[in-house]
Amino acid sequence: MTAPSEPVSASEPLVPGAPPPATLWVDLWSGIARDNPVLVQMLGLCPTMAVSNSLANGVAMGIATLFVLVGSSFLISASRKHIPNEVRLTSYILIIATFVTVADLALAAGFPVISKALGPFVPLIVVNCIILGRAEAFAGKVSPSRAVADAVGMGLGFTFALSGLSAFREVLGSGSLLGYHVLGSHFEPWVFMVMPPGGFLTLGLIFLGMGWYGTRKARRAKERSA
Amino acid sequence: MSDHAHTHAAPAPAVAPGSSTPAWRLVATLALGGAAAGALVAYVYQATLPSIQQFADARIAGAVNEVLAAPARLDTLYLVGDKLSRTPPPGVELREVTKAFVGYDDQGARTGVAVEAGEPGFADDVRLMIGFNPATSALTGYAVLGQKETPGLGDKIEKDSAFGAQFPGKTAPLRGSKAAAADPSTVQTITGATISSRAVIKIINNAVARWQPRLAAFDAEAPK
């Protein structure tokens, strides 16, 4: 994923445990695809299950998380030299909680219907492991530009995963997409798809598909090299 | 696949061994950070409060309009103690006062009263705006102000118009029935959401029973 041959920038001494140097593009892309927080790292599955029953909810949750991730990653990275190591997690949570509260209030003021549908899951972004995970593993150890690139990638990866999952569940579970009926009136919605079991089943199917794809790709690569 | 997942997540202390930060710096960092965060949250809260409250008020007004079928004129009565009054109690935030909304048609005749009520449903409280005629106990309808019932089943109390359409014209106290019934006090419950349906019925029955004596007392004291 990262090119080990790339030189370490002299102005940026490597912090112990810091991610290896990489271009901003690689940082951004890794969150969307190869390190996708939901599909590969399997982080943030609670909100993924809970709000992926309609596309509007999934997209709104993804964007709210993206906002918090980018804002907190930038601030954590920018102030990383001023935050003593002993209180770094406390400081990270303080920063994250502030952004979440701002996002929650902004959503309630600007998009009251969506805010009502998401209910307690926006405040719970504070404890979403993707965000604290990225703060501790990445943002607290790299420059703000890399932190933001990574946050945008992870946020988009989360949003895309959530959108795909929720579109699938909404079409089968309610027969609609973004509230518009797409499967006609003769379609009897599979109610269980919009309830938790449908979420587990859909996510399981996605993991199955990805596992199958990964195994096949590995086998092809092996055959080619043989 | 799994080795990619942990590429960034190398757990390691980010400080050189032996170094330590003086306690005052830890306290100062958290105090400064906390103060800045608090100030920001307070500012955003103040900035968003008007539109959040405006939305809440609009929802109440919309629900009243819906259950009383767009009345020509609306009176607001305030509950002070256990008595209704045309004037709100002094020194209390208006939003906190329990209210009854009385609707009149363009001839000045009373068409119904709308009150807010809530009780536990299948998941969390169901809050309704209920419209009824206190003299005859006939309902004019209900609107859902808040519910967290099961999507696709219990949320039909809000989203299935066939269920809600049964209520106008029925007379409280209501009964629920699994079969369709023409009886003026029986409504057909939603298949797969009996508990949610019964919650709506119970909220309406209790609200009518609670509000009827208050409205009667108000009418007796202050004839219009």
Image (cartoon, coloured by chain):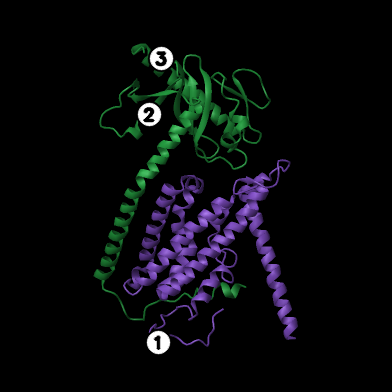
Chain colours: A purple, B green
Q: Which mark is residue A10?
A: 1
Residue shown at 60% from the left, 27% from the top: B165
Q: Position of residue A193 (x, y in %)?
A: 65, 49
In this rendered view, identify the residue nearer to me: B99 or B223.
B223
Against B35, residue B96 (above or below) is: above
Q: CA distance from mark 1 to mark 2?
A: 67 Å
What residue type is disc 2 on? Answer: Thr
Classify 10 Å Cα crowding around label 2: few (below 14), some (14-19), many (20 and above): some
Against A69, residue B3 (above or below) is: below
Q: Position of residue B172 (x, y in %)?
A: 54, 19
Classify 10 Å Cα crowding around label 1: few (below 14), some (14-19), many (20 and above): few
The answer to whether marks 1 and 3 mark residues whose Cβ atoms lie closer than 8 Å is no
What residue type is disc 3 on? Answer: Ala
Residue shown at 32% from the left, 24% from the top: B81
What residue type is disc 1 on? Answer: Ala
Q: Share a chain, discs 1 and 2?
A: no
**Rendering quarter of residue A162:** bottom right
Q: CA distance from mark 1 to mark 3?
A: 83 Å
Q: For residue A197, say whether it is visible.
A: no
Q: Position of residue A226 (x, y in %)?
A: 75, 86
Against B87, residue B19 (above or below) is: below
**Label 2: which secondary element:** loop
Q: Which mark is residue B216?
A: 3
Q: Chain of mark 3?
A: B
Q: CA distance from mark 3 to mark 2?
A: 17 Å
Q: Going by the image, does B126 lie left or right of B52?
A: right
Query: In which quadrant is the N terminus of chain B drawn?
Result: bottom right
Q: Which mark is residue B98?
A: 2
Q: Which mark is residue B28?
A: none
Q: Going by the image, does B48 lie left or right of B66?
A: left
